[in-house]
Amino acid sequence: MSRVKIFNKKQPKPITVNDKEVWICQCGLSADFPFCNGTHHKIQDEPENELYQYDEKLNRKKVKIVEDN
Ligand code: FES
């Protein structure tokens, strides 16, 4: 079984755990997920309202959206 999860944020979210600030990945590409590892810098040029798929080497492919009527 496979699943697709869409992440639409481009920045991590800071949270505080035991008085220590940690950064939570919101782009979905971090190898240290759920923690940010800086990979989000690679997606900053993504245009809004477009969908991309990334493979494990972070190669990017635009996904064509087909609307079902
Ligand atoms: S927000 Fe995903 S790697 Fe930083």
Image (cartoon, rainbow, N blue to C red):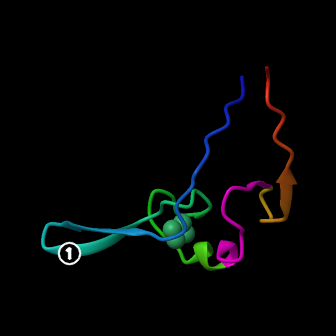
Report the residue at 55% width, 68% height from top. Answer: 10
In the image, taking residue 20 as reference, residue 13 lies left or right, namely right
User: Neighbour class for label 1 at 10 Å: few (<14), some, many (≥20)?
Assistant: few
For ligand 1, tell me if the residue under mark 1 lies within 8 Å: no
Is residue 43 part of the magenta span, yes or no?
A: yes
| Vertical comparison of 38 with 31: above or below | below
Residue 61 at what x, y percent from top left? Answer: 86, 57
Q: Which residues are magenta?
A: 42-53
Residue 58 at what x, y percent from top left? Answer: 77, 65
In the image, taking residue 29 as reference, residue 54 lies left or right, namely right
Label 1 SS: strand
Query: Which quarter shows the C terminus?
Result: top right
Asked whether 47 or 57 is in front, the reply is 47
Q: Tag 1: residue type?
A: Lys
Q: Which residue is mark 1?
A: 20
Residue 49 is drawn in which quadrant? bottom right
Report the residue at 20% width, 75% height from top. Answer: 20
